[in-house]
Amino acid sequence: MITEIPGITVGHWTNLDAGTGCTVVLCPEGACAGVDVRGSAPGTRETDLLDPLCMVEEVHAVLLGGGSAYGLAAADGVMRWLEEHGFGLDVGVARVPIVPAAILFDLPLGRPDVRPDAAAGYAACAAASDGPVTEGSVGAGTGAAVGKIMGFQRAVKGGLGVAGRRLSSGVIVSALVAVNPFGGVVDPATGAVLAGPRQDDGSFADTVACGERLLGRTLQEMAGTNTTLAVVATDARLDKAGCRKVAQMAQDGYARAIRPAHTRLDGDTIFALSRGDKPGDAGLIGAVAADLVAEAIVRAVQAATSLHGIPAIRDLRGAA
């Protein structure tokens, strides 16, 4: 679990009636961070400062949220919580919390006029703990959906998943992913579609196979309506360049478990956090992170529950 890394806690704010939520990964004492954005429709905040050339060396939280661009406001609440508790970058006259954020599009589910706001971000911080992270239709994964090429009414529920591993060196690597892609989720080992657009017979279609017939229309109708977001973390000591490399390599996990990934319709973004003093190699950690991201994606759709008419694969299996 990502919360086994000392100094990292995770909290959710979930609104099932509205079909949206947000998730905060808190590291109040500071963590070195990097980011990689591969999708062409991102919604982000404070990502430029994660460039290794930029001055700020640490962040104090990462916020993932639903609500499309409106959801970026939840980061204000995270900043307020951190400020109230005395955390942030010391600028002499105040402490300024550094809170990168990214959002996904979940407005069609539930109420589009209710989105994560500053109060939601604050509540997620207040709920944060170092215990097991709840998975499924919770936090940033509440309103997530998978496989929308045949229309939202044919999609299945996405969600939030986590995965982690302790290496033989003792280094922990973990991933937390909110899964809301345009494509379907596939088994990384076999390529079989686990969650995707539902066909009349109840089976899942392959999004790429549907592409020639439907993609032109879908590009017009669904631009910017999808995104998979992740935070990968380790207790190995990495600098900003190392964190960025881990985030880059972790994107391979999207490609293994989502077909297709990194499209013009997605805002695929991965943050990487390093909090700890253990020796570690960014290349090895990045390779493990990619495996864990793929695993967390599968766990997200397996743990999701049906919501507002969009069925989860667990319920579809039960009906079959």
Image (cartoon, rainbow, N blue to C red):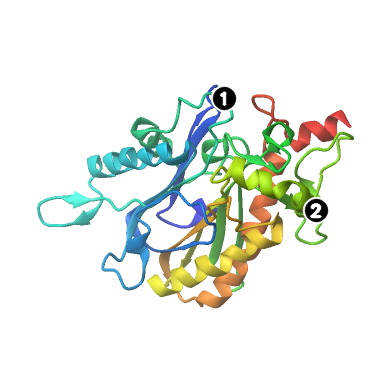
User: Is 272 displayed left or right of 285 in the figure?
Assistant: left
Q: Residue at x 49, y 76 (%)?
A: 280
Read off the residue under disc 1: 110
Whether residue 91 is visible: yes
| Nearer to me, 171 or 222 | 222
Q: Say whether residue 22 is left or right of residue 257.
A: left
Up/down of 238 relative to 206, above or below: below
Q: Dot 2, crowdedness within 10 Å: few (<14), some or many (≥20)?
A: few
**Image check: 299 left or right of 319?**
left
Q: What residue type is labelled 2?
A: Ala
Label 1 secondary element? loop
Q: Residue furthest top?
A: 17
Residue 88: percent from the left, percent from the top?
25, 52
Which residue lies at the image location 22% right of the left edge and 51% below the top edge?
A: 96
The residue at which mark 2 appears reads as 209
Q: Which of 4 and 294 is in front in this view?
A: 294
- Which residue is rendered at x = 70% and y = 49% of the image? 215
Query: In which quadrant of the rendered image does the C terminus lie?
Result: top right
Q: Name the kind of residue labelled 1 in the image.
A: Gly
Residue drawn at x 47%, y 57% as measured from the top left: 5
Q: Which mark is residue 189?
A: none
Residue contact between numbered discs 1 and 2, judged by CB atoms under 8 Å: no
Q: Where residue 172 appears, x then y in whole percent? A: 54, 64
Residue farthest toward the left in the current orientation of the protein: 93
Which of discs 1 and 2 lies nearer the camera? The answer is 2
Q: Position of residue 157 (x, y in %)?
A: 68, 36
> For residue 106, which quarter of the picture?
top right
Residue 11 shows in the view: no
Residue 308 is drawn in which quadrant? Answer: top right
Q: Is mark 2 on a helix, strand or loop?
A: helix
- The Cα atoms of the two marked residues, 1 and 2, are separated by 30 Å
